[in-house]
Amino acid sequence: MITPAQGVAAVTGVILSKESGQALSGISVHLAEVFRQGNEAAYILNTATSPSTVTDRAGQFAISNIPPREYVIVIGDPSARYAIITEPDGRAKVWSTQPGKILDIGIHSVTLQ
């Protein structure tokens, strides 16, 4: 179990294949920061500096010591096959992290495009 340091957050979850239902092991999980201006929002993923990790054999991941912000979660390789965790209407789901807290996103099944 991870414990975030004071002033930072952590994100955990499990990623499965939508097709097979099996764990996606060894797949990248990236946090793309959300920027807002009025009623508009955009997310930016910098594969060199955005918080990221790789899932284990069970599809589990944990990213610790991240700035408490809003993020969109990108699974896979953004330059090849990837998926974005979305809302039921297809829009990117925005996750909000809090200082000193663990955000458990639960289990998500994805199809890498």
Image (cartoon, rainbow, N blue to C red):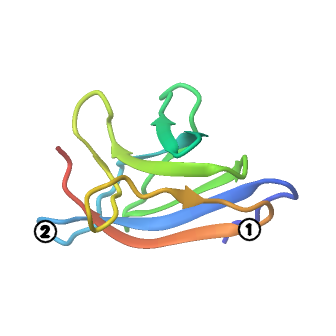
Kindly state the secondary structure of the residue where label 2 is placed. loop
Which image quarter is the C terminus in? top left
Left or right: 55 in relation to 53? left
Q: Which one is closest to the eye, mark 1 or mark 2? A: 1
N-terminal label among 1 and 2: 2
Left or right: 38 in relation to 42? right
- Seen from this angle, which residue lies furthest right? 6
Left or right: 80 in relation to 14? left
- The answer to whether 28 is drawn above or below residue 104 in the figure is above
Foreground: 96 or 58? Answer: 96
Q: Are marks 1 and 2 in contact (CB under 8 Å)?
A: no
Query: Where does the image place residue 16, in percent across and percent down from the top left?
Result: 28, 66
What number of labels is visible?
A: 2
- Seen from this angle, which residue lies furthest front? 38
Query: Where does the image place residue 86, in percent across and percent down from the top left?
Result: 33, 59
Query: Where does the image place residue 83, in percent across and percent down from the top left?
Result: 28, 48
Kindly state the secondary structure of the residue where label 1 is placed. loop
Amino acid beneath label 2: Ser
The image quarter in which residue 1 lies: bottom right
